[in-house]
Structure formats: structure tokens, C-alpha cells
């Protein structure tokens, strides 16, 4: 049947050589030279499937007519009778051959047209019903199933795309997308309102005022009051960019206002605590008709102590607000511990566990240890202050745990709040400075009270390779 030939043509497109299928190299001596191949092999390799069908039908017609002529010649027919018979038989035979070719070609063309229609997304056309044993019918059903699956996927993607577009259009954050050629492929309403210029799809990013530096987009209109984010991603094996900007002016103003209020409150508190006694003592001296040298020296000595304490507070505040970038080096932590402990008025009993090799900024880490030892010494009401220090690595991070035997933190929630203190002579900067140094190293500092055992401070920061990256 014609459809059998059509299916055979599909089968012929598969590799027939096992070595081709398995990607096995055929030795050079096993390959047959082209000049030794048969005429039929070379003819088959040069003809297409359609040309091969036409060639086969032509050979069949010629063979039938030749056999008919040979039969009439063996029966001693005259040449005229033989020619007449061949002529009469040639028409129906050629017509049958043409009908066979037309049947095969029509089925293939109908299937091709149906596939093209499915590719265009048309669903109102259907392939002509085929016999249940027709191989082309089975192929048509597989193509229909594939087309329906693709159509469903396309509708799902289109629905998701419309949903995302609707969400982004109603989003107050400016967002725009650029394709692999840095041409605009999407922008929401907030982006158009912010830039106040035509943003036609397909426009170059440079023409819209964007600058691409180190694979990151930026725009001059989004100043320091905007938190910009540029992300590159791969979509359909093409590198694209998405740019978004968040207006942080209001949170910045609120944070600045809170910072100023805290600064004024703390400075006013410290200045009042220092200047009020100074003014009182100076007023006492001025009210005396005569000056007692011993009294004057005592007043001046107290004024000096208050002044030094105020200068110390200002120096500590300066350290908190101006931390330099850490210089990461490897060093022996035991040496820093000994130096910090030597600076204490009441030396602490140190119990060290773990690897003493540490990677951090030596000066800043020394400042942390001094503050922690000082807090532990002041919090311990016992005769000896005991401090346990554990150093270990956890998930590419360095961890230092410092545990003391003091009374713990009186107010754990506000212990890291700058300028907050429960001590009579404290400034509330020590632990805040430690937390800021930890953040400066890309890590964090955590506080914890231990039942009947004091307080534990845990510092965590990444290794040097992660910081450098």
C-alpha cells in the first residue's frame, strides 16, 4: 500500500550503520572506496525519497510494457498489433502509477499542511480520518498530541506572563528588562513615570540613559536615595538583565532623624553629667571671698577627671562611627588574648580551647577582646573572673565563643544598642563597637545568658577567601 512506502521512507532516514549509531570510528581499511560501490548504492544515495518513488514506478511501467511486447513477439504478432497493444496498455498502467504516486504524495502533503497549521496555533482544523491500521494516521495522532501539549504549555506561559506583567505594572517599584542585545523588552508604569521619557520596546539601554558596567546596569536619575539592583540571568540560552530601584528616601530620613535624636540625647546626657558638677564646683569657688589652695586643687583635679572622662567618651564614639576596612591576616589568637588580659586591672583566668590560628584584622580583634574582658571583669562579683574561649570553624566560617562566670546581661534585648548601659560609669559603646567590628568583617555577634553560669558572646565571620571574593 502507498502509506507503507511512506512509512518505509521515514525508516530509511535512520542510520543503518551500527558504527554511526554508536559513534564508533570505522577503521580506514574497512571503508569501501567510492569507485568500488555498486551503481545501485550510488544511485540510492543521490536520489531523494520522492525521486526514488518516481524512479521505481517508471521502471515498473517500462518492465510491464517490455514484458507485454516480448509476449506478443513470441506469439508472432505483427509489429502494428504489438505497438497497438503496448499503446493501449500504457495509458491505464501509467494512470495507475500516477495515482499511486499521487496517493502517497497527497497523504504526505496533507500531513505537512496539518503540521504547519498546528504550529501556527490553529485548532479549528482536523486531519482527515484515517484507517485504524494506517501508519500515517498513527503519526497524525502523535503530532496532534504534541500540538495540544505545546498549545497547553503556550497558554500556561502566556497566562503566567500576563499575570507577572499585571503584578509588575501595579508594583510601585520601577522595573525594566533588557534582552541579550541590551534592548528594552519590558518596563512597568513606575519606571516610565520615574524616567519621564518615551520608553519604546526595542530601544537600546544606552539610549534610555542606562550604563552597563561590570555586567551591572545603573542610571543617573537613581541617586543615593534609591537602592538599585541589577541582575543578569539566562533565558533560553540568552543572557538578559533586569533592573529595579527602591525608593529609600523616607526610611533614610526616618533613620537619620532617629540617629540624630539618639546622638543629641546621648551627648546631652554625657555633657550634663560632666558639666553640671564642673559648674557647681566652679560656682562654689567663685562664691568664696578667699581661695583655699587645697580646695582649688581638689576642684581642679575633679574637673580634670570629668574632662578626661568626657574626652574618652568622644574618642570611643569616634571609633564606633569610623571603623576602617579590616586588613585580613593570619595570626596567633593566644598572643592577642595574653595582651588583652595584661591590660586588665584584675587579671582574668583564661581557659582556651581550639585552634589558635585566626584570620581577621589584628587591631580590631584586639579591641574586641579588650572590651569583652573588661565587661567580664566588671560583671564578675567573685574573687576570680573566669573566661572560657572556644575557637572552631563551622560551614566556612570562623567562630569564637567567649563565656564568663559573671552575672550575665541585665537587659539582653538592649545590650547591643549604642550608648545603652546599666553601669554607673559605663558609656554603652563597648559591646556596640564589638558588634560593629564583627559586621565590618562580614559576620555577626550574638549574646546569650547562661543559667547560673554567666554570659556567652559568640562571634562569627567568614574565612579570608569568602571576604576577598
Image (tube, rainbow, N blue to C red):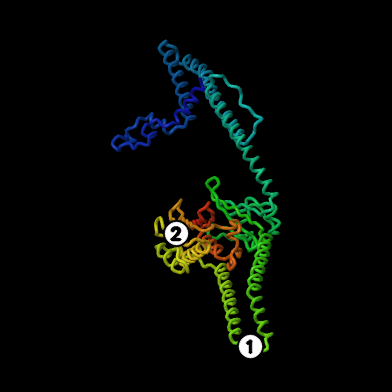
Determine whether the residue tagged by mark 2 lies in a helix, strand or loop. helix
Q: Which disc number belongs to residue 126?
A: none
Label 1 neighbour load within 10 Å: few <14, some 14-19, many 20+: few
Q: Marks 1 and 2, Cα distance to the nearest angstrom?
A: 63 Å
> Which residue is most to the left?
29
Q: x%, y% of residue 277?
A: 64, 76
Task: Give the residue displayed 40% in from the left and 65% down from the top.
Answer: 335
Front label number (1 vs 2): 1
**Residue 62 quadrant:** top left
Q: Which one is in front, 167 or 311?
A: 311
Q: For the image shown, how many numbered marks are present on the structure?
A: 2
**Residue 331 quadrant:** bottom left
Q: Which disc number belongs to residue 291?
A: 1
Q: x%, y% of residue 191?
A: 67, 55
Residue 63 position (above or below residue 205): above
Determine whether the residue tagged by mark 1 lies in a helix, strand or loop. loop
Instruction: Name which of mark 1 and mark 2 comes first in the sequence.
Output: 1
Q: Which residue is mark 2?
A: 464
Q: x%, y% of residue 429?
A: 57, 66
Task: Give the residue displayed 45% in from the left and 15% down from the top.
Answer: 68
Q: Which one is in front, 82 or 379?
A: 379
Residue 256 position (above or below residue 2): below
Q: Which one is in front, 448 or 60?
A: 448
> Which residue is most to the top?
75
Relative to residue 454, is residue 199 drawn left or right? Answer: right
Task: Give the residue displayed 42% in from the left and 10% down from the top.
Answer: 75
Q: x%, y% of residue 149?
A: 59, 32
Amino acid at each position: 500500500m502507498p502509506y507503507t512506502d511512506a512509512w518505509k521512507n521515514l525508516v530509511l532516514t535512520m542510520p543503518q550503520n551500527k558504527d554511526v549509531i554508536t559513534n564508533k570510528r570505522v577503521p580506514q581499511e574497512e571503508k569501501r572506496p567510492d569507485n568500488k560501490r555498486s551503481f545501485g548504492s550510488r544511485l540510492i544515495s543521490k536520489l531523494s525519497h520522492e525521486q526514488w518513488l518516481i524512479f521505481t514506478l517508471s521502471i515498473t511501467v517500462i518492465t510491464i510494457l517490455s514484458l507485454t511486447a516480448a509476449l506478443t513477439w513470441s506469439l508472432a504478432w505483427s509489429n502494428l498489433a504489438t505497438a497497438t497493444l503496448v499503446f493501449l496498455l500504457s495509458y491505464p498502467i501509467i494512470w495507475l502509477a500516477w495515482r499511486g504516486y499521487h496517493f502517497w504524495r497527497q497523504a504526505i502533503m496533507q500531513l505537512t499542511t496539518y503540521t504547519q497549521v498546528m504550529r501556527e496555533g490553529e485548532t479549528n482544523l482536523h486531519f482527515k480520518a484515517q484507517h485504524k491500521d494506517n501508519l500515517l494516521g498513527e503519526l497524525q495522532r502523535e503530532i496532534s498530541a504534541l500540538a495540544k501539549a505545546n498549545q497547553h504549555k503556550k497558554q500556561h506561559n502566556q497566562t503566567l506572563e500576563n499575570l507577572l506583567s499585571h503584578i509588575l505594572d501595579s508594583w510601585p517599584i520601577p522595573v525594566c528588562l533588557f534582552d541579550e542585545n541590551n534592548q528594552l523588552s519590558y518596563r512597568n508604569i513606575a519606571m516610565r513615570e520615574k524616567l519621564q521619557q518615551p520608553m519604546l520596546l526595542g530601544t537600546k539601554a544606552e539610549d534610555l540613559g542606562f550604563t552597563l558596567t561590570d555586567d551591572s546596569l545603573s542610571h543617573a536619575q537613581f541617586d543615593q536615595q534609591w537602592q538599585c539592583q541589577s541582575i543578569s540571568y539566562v533565558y533560553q540560552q540568552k543572557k538578559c538583565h533586569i533592573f529595579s530601584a527602591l525608593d529609600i528616601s523616607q526610611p533614610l530620613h526616618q533613620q537619620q532623624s532617629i540617629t540624630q535624636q539618639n546622638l543629641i540625647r546621648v551627648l546631652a546626657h554625657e555633657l550634663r553629667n560632666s558639666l553640671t558638677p564642673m559648674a557647681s564646683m566652679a560656682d562654689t569657688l567663685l562664691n568664696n571671698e578667699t581661695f583655699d589652695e587645697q580646695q582649688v586643687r581638689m576642684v581642679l583635679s575633679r574637673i580634670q577627671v570629668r574632662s578626661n572622662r568626657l574626652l574618652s567618651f568622644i574618642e570611643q564614639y569616634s571609633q564606633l562611627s569610623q571603623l576602617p576596612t579590616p586588613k585580613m591576616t593570619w595570626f596567633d589568637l593566644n598572643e592577642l588574648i595574653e595582651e588583652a588580659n595584661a591590660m586588665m586591672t584584675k587579671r582574668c583566668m583564661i581557659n582556651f580551647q581550639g585552634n589558635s590560628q585566626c584570620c581577621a584584622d589584628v587591631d580590631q580583634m584586639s579591641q574586641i577582646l579588650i572590651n569583652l574582658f573588661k565587661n567580664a571583669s566588671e560583671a564578675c562579683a567573685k574573687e576570680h573572673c573566669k573566661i572560657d574561649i572556644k575557637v572552631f570553624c563551622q560551614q566556612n566560617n570562623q567562630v569564637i565563643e567567649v563565656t564568663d562566670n559573671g552575672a550575665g546581661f541585665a537587659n539582653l534585648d538592649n545590650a547591643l544598642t549604642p550608648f545603652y548601659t546599666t553601669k554607673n560609669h559605663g558609656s554603652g559603646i563597648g559591646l556596640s563597637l564589638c558588634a560593629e567590628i564583627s559586621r565590618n568583617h562580614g559576620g555577626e555577634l550574638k549574646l546569650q545568658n547562661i543559667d547560673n553560669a554567666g554570659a556567652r558572646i559568640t562571634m562569627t565571620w567568614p574565612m579570608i577567601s569568602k571576604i576577598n571574593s
